[in-house]
Image (cartoon, rainbow, N blue to C red):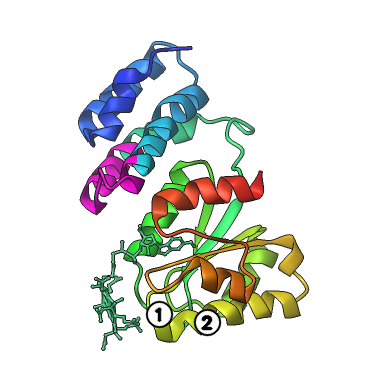
């Protein structure tokens, strides 16, 4: 396997130009696009998620690493062949109906995206029907619900109820999070997984879909 240590460090440290240069060098040197993606860029972002989880990285560091990751990945995307990258699962993510907070939801989306999940980002104030459409139209098998207001937490339960009424609850995993959300609430409303932060959402969802 090629030595991607320097490229991993460039992404972890948010050095965008260096990450782009090292990615180009790796590709010019004959490394397979898939290997550069998975063994360098994704591996680096998983380390970023770990640091965020341990409170060693804060939001600005994560965003700077993500910028380096995305710039390097832009060189790889056109070279990926069909079958080179199979997402672990397709995740419909959104902030629930009535709620406009999206900073945390975006962090979760970027962490899951760089860990190998395909993300369908539905934005904020997302109705249960929009999540249902993502299941039937986009083939999403994971529904990720974020809520920041105590007043919008019931929208999480309503979305789960709508999935049940549409007969698709058994086909999808529902994960939830956001500042007022707890494991106890997750158990109470019958969601499949809860995580307190974006870094742990990756491990939690990987375990859930394994
Ligand atoms: Co609002 N707001 N806000 N706000 N806001 C809070 C949440 C609040 C706690 C502030 C306060 O009063 N102290 C309070 C809620 C009180 C409550 O319900 N208990 C509040 C309120 C009341 C309101 C309004 C009602 C204010 C008003 O208009 N009177 C209003 C509501 C609008 C609406 O949504 N309908 C409102 C509006 C806004 C702004 C638009 C101004 C802005 C949002 C901008 C945006 O998101 N684009 C805003 C902000 C910025 C905040 C605070 C200051 C910061 C939230 C944030 O982004 N945190 C917040 C107070 C605070 O938290 N200090 C507050 C950073 C983010 C990274 O953390 O979102 O928790 P967080 O996400 C974490 C985890 O929770 C987790 O991972 C993330 C990263 O680790 N996580 C998940 C999140 N989603 C997850 C999903 C998962 C797993 C993990 O799986 C699917």
Residue found 28% across the figure and 46% down from its top: 62
x then y, percent, for residue 141: 66, 57
Dot 2: within a 10 Å radius of its alpha carbon, few (fewer than 14), some, or many (20 or more) residues? many
Residue sitting nearer the eye, 1 or 176: 176
Residue sitting nearer the eye, 73 or 106: 106
| Location of residue 132 with respect to 58 vertically, above or below | below
Q: Label 1, secondary structure: give it.
A: loop
Queried whether the magenta region covers residue 79, the answer comes back as: no
Residue found 57% across the figure and 56% down from its top: 91
Residue sitting nearer the eye, 53 or 79: 53
Q: Are marks 1 and 2 in contact (CB under 8 Å)?
A: yes
Place residue 193 in its image quadrant: bottom right
x then y, percent, for residue 2: 43, 12
Q: Which residues are magenta?
A: 51-70
Whether residue 108 appears in this view of the structure is yes
Residue reaching furthest to the front: 184
Residue found 26% across the figure and 23% down from its top: 21
**Mark 1 = which residue?**
99
| Location of residue 186 with respect to 74 vertically, above or below | below
How many numbered markers are drawn? 2
x then y, percent, for residue 175: 56, 62
* Beta carbon of the mark 1 residue lies under 8 A of ligand 1: yes
Disc sitting over residue 3 in the figure: none
Residue 171 located left or right of residue 59: right
x then y, percent, for residue 102: 35, 68
Q: CA distance from mark 1 to mark 2?
A: 9 Å
Queried whether the magenta region covers residue 59, the answer comes back as: yes
Residue sitting nearer the eye, 104 or 204: 204
**Mark 2 = which residue?**
155
């Amino acid at each position: 396997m090629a030595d991607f240590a320097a490229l991993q460090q460039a992404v972890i440290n948010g050095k965008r130009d260096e990450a782009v240069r090292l990615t180009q060098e790796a590709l010019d040197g004959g490394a397979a696009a898939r290997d550069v993606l998975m063994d360098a860029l994704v591996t680096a972002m998983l380390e970023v998620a770990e640091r965020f989880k341990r409170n060693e990285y804060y939001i600005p560091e994560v965003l700077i690493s993500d910028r380096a990751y995305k710039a390097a990945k832009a060189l790889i995307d056109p070279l990926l062949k069909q079958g080179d990258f199979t997402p672990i699962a397709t995740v419909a993510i959104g902030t629930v109906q009535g709620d406009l907070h999206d900073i945390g939801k975006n962090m979760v989306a970027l962490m899951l995206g760089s860990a190998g999940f395909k993300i369908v980002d539905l934005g904020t104030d997302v109705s249960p029907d929009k999540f249902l459409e993502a299941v039937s139209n986009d083939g999403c098998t994971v529904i990720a619900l974020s809520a920041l207001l105590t007043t919008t937490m019931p929208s999480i339960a309503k979305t789960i109820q709508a999935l049940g009424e549409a007969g698709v609850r058994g086909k999808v995993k529902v994960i939830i999070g956001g500042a007022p959300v707890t494991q106890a609430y997750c158990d109470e409303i019958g969601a499949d997984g809860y995580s307190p932060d974006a870094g742990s959402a990756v491990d939690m969802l990987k375990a859930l879909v394994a």
